[in-house]
Image (cartoon, rainbow, N blue to C red):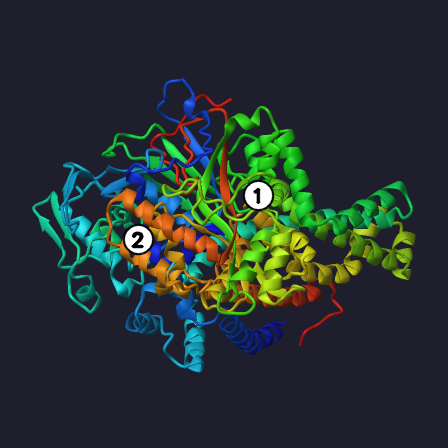
Amino acid sequence: MLGYISRRFLQLIPIMLGITLVTFLLMRAAGGDPVMQLIDDRSAGMDQAAVDAIRQQWGLDQPLPVQYLRFVANAVKGDLGRSYVSRSSVAQAINERVPATARLGLTALIFAVIVGIAAGTIAAARRNSWFDTATMVVALAGVSIPVFWLALLMMYLFAVKWHVLPASGYGDGQLKYLIMPAFALGAGITGVVARVTRSAMLGVIKAEYITTARSKGLSESKVIFKHALRNALIPVVTIIGVQLGGVLSGAVITESIFNWPGIGRLLVDSIGKRDQPMVQGVVIFFALLFALVNLLVDVAYAAVDPRIRYS
Amino acid sequence: MKQLSRILAPAMIAALVVAGCGSSATKPPTGDKPAPAVDPAKPVQGGVFTKSLNYGDPGNLDPIMKSDVAAQMVTMNIFDTLVKYDPIKKTIVKSVAADYKISDDGLTYTFTLKNGVLFHNGRELKAADVKYTIERASNPKLAPVTLKLFDKVAGYDEFQKGATEISGIKVAGDYDLTITLKQPKATLLMDLASAPAGIVPKEEAEKPDFGQKPVGSGPFKLVDWKKDDKITLAANDKYQGGRPYLDQVVFRIMKEEQTRDAEFQSGTLDSMTLGETQYKRYAADPEKQKGLVEVPELFTRAIHFNTTKAPFDNVKVRQAINYAIDKKAIVEKVLYNKAFVATGVLPSSSPAYDPNLKGYAYDPNKAKQLLQEAGVPNGFTFDVLVTAATAKWMEAMNIDLNKIGINGKINQMESSTLLEKARNGDYQAVIFSTGGDVDPISFLGRFESRNFGKGGNVTLYKNDQVDKLLAEASTVTDPAKRNDIARQAEKIIVAETPWFIFNYNKAVAIAQPWVHGLQPVPTDIDFQDLTQVWVSNKK
């Protein structure tokens, strides 16, 4: 297992190099001359010597390959450059926002996993019951309703009409600020997890070893949760891994609507301001996160299914 | 868009008033609607005022690094300036300066500073700090937004070439300062009053994170800045102009209109600026409308024509478009009356506004006739650059244009890309709002040929008479004369119409019933003097 993980980490190197190269080139192609982005409205009054001085100061006078290699060398040390807007460290800006996004994303995900798996399992165990029907209708709604619509609806009901939750913001980190954004972000994932769990469970429940377990006189809850669920979890783990991408992209929308000071919002704002280094830094951060999550999902397979061995 | 227009006016960035200091020959209709300011109640000391900051996180609060609305809204409260512009009285007033004198030739400005003005770090502000501030703002190595702000000060050019100081700024003792100009500059006091000229203490400004931890001598000091969430300022008890009424000001960084709406309706936001649909809703609510503060802002919305490209190189085509569009209908139906129909370039809150200038009336027949004369009787299709916000304006205008065979092909993009294309002349027509200058000569600089492209004249319009008039005005310091010259130039510009002059923005803020003292500020309704704002018992 350890060997497998080490190999996967080594594979990350070319992947990340590829991502940084593509991001770097795309940003340059999309953004035009970085010096003009940097000095922007100031350029009108500047003579060429001053512009050249700034180009040199920011290392933008070097050929592109040199700039790229420098960027990579610095990125390895955790330095993602300086923002053209705030003139301060990109890595620091990401650092400042990671806790908010992590808090939101993890809460949404934990909520989705617990509620989704529980609802899907019970729905499968009680197939065709009213609970099954109701769960699947709610799950379908969760998957279908756009995040922004759900967010605005909740905001209207809980903040404007009933005054029970704050409409938006982070506050000082109190739980009440987290409830609506986490629910909005988690609703869709919960629906997906519930549906996948249910269908996986339905496949497993018919298996002979479940009949054997029952005939041995095990309680129904032991049969379902210990024997059936564990085997049904593989597709669920896969879908959770895939949905993590949904958490990241959903965070972009949720954070914007709920005024949540996370990385998603930083990305959107930076694109609007054409802050190349910031966009570059955030995209690379997202890519790394995604790659690591995928690795984690693969490792989790082995944990939930003893038949899977990485050697 | 307002940020865009500010960026588009680099040459005139803080060039403002003077013209507003004198009496105007014609009195513009103001349409101002100060709201709870007229409350008879006595101001109450204390409380927190929470206001939305609609434009995203400013990122940097060093006054010389950012000049957009978001940054200025905050920095104008943290930093103090030698003099201030009072947008209501339309005049320059003293601030850190206890007194100032201007020599008869308009070349020497002598300032005497107040004693005992303290920076937030406790050190006294002295004349040397003002000199340092101006030199820092003119330092090309820092690439500041203010680089050209003080370019008329004697010794500026040498400083750009590496001299260690600007020789035209002389400090005498702790409190006396003289600024000598190479040539008269009518807007120098306004430049000194602008937020980017906020006075900074050297020992703080030279710290690498000054933009994140700004220290000034203004009425409020920064106590907390949660990026993308909120900026909290606390009253400066030792403020030279007297302690503000408020204990704290919280700027909530909120880009989404619906979110601001929800916060305002739930009572957690004390004030916000409104968009068109919000305005329509709040203006129709008998209770909520009491909290509206309205002002014709100094911004003009227009289609800018590239006058070097066909068919807009033909003045008759440009005039035809002006006659073809029913501006009033669009203001009513698309902008929900959150705008005023434009008759000229200068908005009605400009001191040089000319009520006798009638602009172009809606006359499709005249438009057809002009197209005939221009040799395009069947009309044409042109590309027009818009943003998501302005696309609907063009769609509405197309209804009228299609009637005479013209069609504006909408090309929607991000405002920053649109800006770059506009500056580079890489467009046929482009829509945006521009302005912010109280000084009419600075406003009209957008039509001077010396400002082609990045200087603000994106239409590449050139008229010798306009150039001559505006060049003459640059050394005239008498406000009335400047207004007269502006009106003469404006007449020519309107006749040749490098812009389809569309409408003037009506800026609208709304406040909760417990908020008092907000003013209809025409430079930008977000630039409130928060020392005058107070809150009574909330709910």
Quadrant of the rendered image containing residue A244: bottom right
Q: Is residue B410 visible?
A: no
Residue drawn at point x = 64 percent, y = 57 percent = B368
Quadrant of the rendered image containing residue B431: bottom right
Judging depth in this view, the residue of B5 and A207 nearest the camera is B5
Q: Position of residue B521 (x, y in %)?
A: 40, 37
User: Is A58 placed above or below B365 here?
Assistant: below
- Rate crowding at label 1 as few (under 14), some (14 to 19) or many (20 or more) other CA atoms within 10 Å: some
The secondary structure type at the circle numbered 1 is: helix
Disc nearest the viewer among 1 and 2: 1
Tell which subunit mark 2 falls on.
B
User: Is B10 placed above or below B436 here?
Assistant: below
Judging depth in this view, the residue of A186 and B79 nearest the camera is B79
Q: Earlier in the sequence, mark 1 or mark 2?
A: 2
Q: Do the residues labelled 1 and 2 touch (CB within 8 Å)?
A: no
Name the mark on residue B257. 1
Tell which subunit mark 1 falls on.
B
Identify the amino acid type marked 1: Glu
Name the residue at the left extreme. B173
Is B250 placed left or right of B220 in the picture?
Answer: right
Q: Where is residue B327 in the image (x, y as percent from the top left)?
A: 58, 46
Is B333 placed left or right of B112 in the picture?
Answer: right
Give the labeled residue for mark 2: B210
Q: Is residue B326 visible?
A: yes
Whole-Å distance between the Cαs marked 1 and 2? 31 Å
Residue drawn at point x = 61 percent, y = 53 percent = B366
Q: Position of residue A37 (x, y in %)?
A: 43, 66
